[in-house]
Amino acid sequence: MSDAVITGTGLWRPPHVISNAELVASYNAYADLQNAKHAAAIAAGERQPLPHSSVEFIEKASGIRQRYVIEKEGVLDPTRMRPRFAPRRDDELSLMAEIAVAAAQQALAAAGREGSDIDGVLCAAANMQRAYPAMACEIQAALGAKGYAFDMNVACSSATFAIEQAANAVRTGSAKCVLVVNPEITSAHLEWRDRDCHFIFGDVCTAVIVEAAETAKAAERWRIVGTKLATQYSNNIRNNAGFLNRCEDTDPDARDKTFMQEGRKVFKEVVPLAAAHVEQHLASLGLEPTKVRRFWLHQANLGMNQLVVKRLIGRDLTPEVSDEVAPIILGEYANTASAGSIIAFHEHRGGLKAGDVGVICSFGAGYSVGSVVVQRL
């Protein structure tokens, strides 16, 4: 069996930034409009007024300072509170494929590859633009790739789950060079009208090239030492949007048709789950967490990452530890679903030398946890 190596990564970042101050001003204006609209019901005690948000609340709750979005004006319009995307014809490249191709081209360049060298494309993301044809097939065609392509969704763990599929394909010989791409248009499924979550997500797209070590061209190579995936059903992160909605005669704009979570329950349950998963994975490979040079963790919440790191290595996630051991990109990017751990790996793998070991880890809805142990060659 061939060794599978990561030889290139790519990152597409939207052109627009929404600061916490802008987001708070927009949400508070929306809350004021709704409270005025329902003033009579609020006065009669039949309805609770919407509370204001604040920059201090957001940063204390999450560590997020801003987020990138594909479209800004619609999100900040207190009478709309969602992006405004222009529909595209069926013969035009879709929005999700467009950003995926941009990230993929960066990863291909880093790997010293052309689109025609790819013989497997996995589009792995928390939400797909459509049911079919597969987004991966459209991306494959746009890049001139060969072989096969398919979509997969494991919410915020989609990237790590896809990397395992890519590595297994390379190891067994069903593909030689696989593209994993994670187009996360989170602004379209975030509920911007909910104070408890309106600040969480940002848009982005990442890409990773996984190929056989013996035919790799790139000077920088990361051997995939091992992968470990796990799922445990939980209803605490949910989105009920789907093709059955029209048959249920439900409101397509109802609260349950966008991102929902029981944040406190998620925090309490996912932290020990993720930490134990990584610890067990490393033990199965004969490795100690304290010997890991860097952890590229899922970027959902600063507090979660702080506790995961504390459980693994027994050290607080101070700025110095963050820079060297577990980089945080939340402040700039916010939660980017499956792309978060890949952004951390893409931007913060410098300084590691041959033989150093790192862990790419994701955790999210499902619950799902995925870890990829890599070694710099």
Image (cartoon, rainbow, N blue to C red):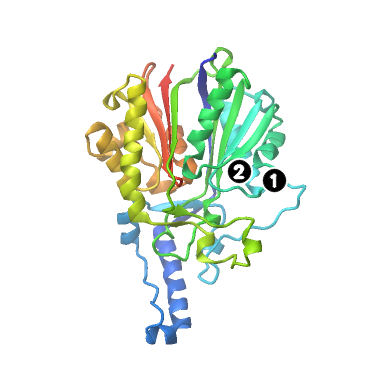
Q: Is residue 89 above or below residue 368?
A: below
Q: Quadrant of residue 289?
A: top left
Could you say which is closer to the camera, residue 10 or residue 307? Answer: 307
Q: Quarter holding the C terminus? A: top left
Q: Amino acid at mark 1?
A: Tyr
Residue 376, image x, y percentages = 42, 20
Q: Quarter holding the N terminus? A: top right
Residue 96, image x, y percentages = 62, 46
* Residue 54 visible in the current orientation: yes
Q: Which residue is mark 2?
A: 99
Residue 71, image x, y percentages = 57, 56
Q: Is residue 6 left or right of residue 328?
A: right
* Residue 9 visible in the current orientation: no
Q: Which mark is residue 62?
A: none
Q: Which residue is mark 1?
A: 132
Q: Is residue 211 above or below residue 104?
A: above
Q: For the residue labelled by badge 2, is the local secondary structure a helix, a strand or a loop?
A: helix
Q: Amino acid at mark 2?
A: Ile
Residue at the location (40% across, 73% down)?
A: 50
Could you say which is closer to the camera, residue 290 or residue 151? Answer: 151
Residue at the location (54% across, 59% down)?
A: 72
Q: Is residue 66 above or below residue 207?
A: below
Badge 1 crowding class, 10 Å Cα cut-off, few under 14, some 14 to 19, many 20 or more, is: few
Residue 265, image x, y percentages = 34, 53
Residue at the location (56% across, 27% down)?
A: 166
Tell me which numbered mark, 1 or 2, is placed earlier along the sequence.
2
Q: Is residue 20 left or right of residue 119?
A: left
Q: For the residue labelled by badge 1, is the local secondary structure a helix, a strand or a loop?
A: loop
